[in-house]
Each structure stands twice: as structure tokens, then as C-alpha cells.
């Protein structure tokens, strides 16, 4: 009686088990190459995660150590910092990018803005409507461009209802999360130009 040995089979793209004797040699080699690269990619990914965790921890510890010289205790996340080596040949930059979203008060602000536009259109200020519609337009994923919405607050419009709408926009803005980025530079050449040590896989 033959016993089933899973190691003697390979699973194809449709979930079927194919005996290794029926799989072409080139297909076996290709399969091995892909899985070999995948295994190594996981190792590289883990190394990068370990580096980021280490850098985050050590930078936070150093900032606290530096603050202790002035009897100051810092709380919260450390970000948007630059550290230089003593010889000024190397620097490390930390940048924290926050992911901003709007809550339901944005729709309230939009209603007030529409009321302003309806009033202003009577006086020929039609061009403002184009600016507003562009700001509230969504992309293909249905997301609103935060930068365009916030740019409305820079418009010099004194209307009280408009000002109230701008306050609603400010109140509706929420921080949904943040990401830390580390950039490491070294000076190079006679002019001492800063060269980024790329940690981007595609840029290597």
C-alpha cells in the first residue's frame, strides 16, 4: 500500500498537487529561485525593522539624556530632529509625518462655505467657487486632499460665516497616526555636499 508523501508533490496555481516527477525541471528551478529570494527578502525586512526600532529607542534615550542637563523632562514622541557627528561629517535626521483626517465637522464647514458661495455669486465672485470645488474634490480612492482643504484658510476673506467655516475645518482636523523616517547623510567632495545614505531598496 502506497503512503502519501507531501514532499513528493508541488502545489500549482490552482491549488492542485502535482507529483514532482511531472513538473518540468525549469519550473522547479524557477520555483526555487523565487522562494530563495523571498526568504532573503524577509531577512532584509526584519533587519530594517530591527534597525528602525533600535534607532527610535536610542534617539529617544539620547534626547532625554540631553534634556537632563537642563533639568527638563520631555514627553511624547521625538521627531523632526537633526543630529551631527562631532566632526560635522555625518548627520542623522528624524522626521515624523502625521496622517491627518477630517471628522464630520468638515461637512458642516462645507455647508457654510456653500452658503457663502451662493451669496457671493450674486455679486459676481464666481471664480471663488472653482477654488472651493477643487479643494473639496476627491481622488480616485475617494480621499480628500488635506493640503487643498487647509489652503482655504489662507484666503483673505473677512466674511463672518466664512471665518466660522474655517474654524470648523480647524476643529475637524484629527491626527490618525504618524510615521517616523530616518535619513542618514555624509559629506562628500570638496564642497562638502550632503549625500544621503539610501535605505530605499529601489534606489540602491
Image (spheres, helix red, strand yellow):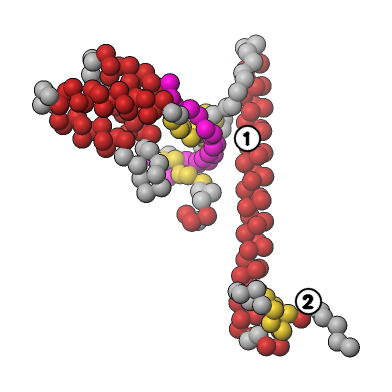
Q: Is residue 84 visible in this depiction of the protein?
A: no
Q: Is residue 183 visible in this depiction of the protein?
A: yes
Q: Report x, y in % for residue 7.
A: 78, 77
Does residue 196 show up magenta in the picture? no
- Please tell me how crowded label 2 is: few (under 14), some (14-19), or many (20+) other residues with Cα within 10 Å: few
Which residue is at 66% across, 77% downward? 16
Does residue 172 show up magenta in the picture? yes
When asked about the image quadrant of residue 167, the answer is top left
Q: In the rendered structure, which segment of residues is drawn in magenta?
A: 171-191
Which residue is at 46% across, 44% downward? 195
Q: Mark 1 points at which residue?
A: 56
Sequence-earlier tag: 2 or 1: 2
- Please tell me how crowded label 1 is: few (under 14), some (14-19), or many (20+) other residues with Cα within 10 Å: some
Label disc, if present, on residue 6 of the rendered structure:
2
Which residue is at 23% across, 33% downward? 131
Q: Residue furthest right?
A: 1
Secondary structure at numbered mark 2: helix
Amino acid at each position: 500500500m502506497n503512503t502519501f508523501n507531501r514532499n513528493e508533490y508541488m502545489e500549482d496555481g490552482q491549488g492542485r498537487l502535482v507529483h514532482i516527477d511531472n513538473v518540468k525541471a525549469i519550473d522547479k528551478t524557477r520555483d526555487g529561485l523565487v522562494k530563495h529570494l523571498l526568504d532573503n527578502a524577509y531577512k532584509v525586512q526584519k533587519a530594517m525593522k530591527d534597525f528602525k526600532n533600535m534607532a527610535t529607542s536610542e534617539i529617544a534615550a539620547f534626547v532625554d539624556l540631553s534634556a537632563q542637563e537642563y533639568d527638563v523632562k520631555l514627553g511624547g514622541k521625538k521627531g523632526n530632529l537633526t543630529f551631527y557627528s562631532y566632526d560635522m561629517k555625518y548627520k542623522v535626521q528624524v522626521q515624523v509625518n502625521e496622517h491627518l483626517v477630517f471628522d464630520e465637522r468638515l461637512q458642516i464647514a462645507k455647508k457654510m462655505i456653500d452658503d457663502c458661495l451662493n451669496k457671493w455669486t450674486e455679486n459676481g465672485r464666481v471664480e471663488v467657487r472653482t477654488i472651493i470645488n477643487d479643494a473639496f474634490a476627491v481622488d480616485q480612492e475617494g480621499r480628500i486632499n488635506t493640503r487643498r482643504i487647509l489652503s482655504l484658510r489662507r484666503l483673505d476673506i473677512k466674511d463672518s460665516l466664512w471665518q466660522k467655516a474655517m474654524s470648523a475645518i480647524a476643529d475637524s482636523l484629527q491626527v490618525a497616526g504618524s510615521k517616523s523616517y530616518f535619513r542618514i547623510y555624509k559629506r562628500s567632495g570638496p564642497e562638502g555636499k550632503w549625500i544621503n545614505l539610501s535605505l530605499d531598496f529601489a534606489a540602491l
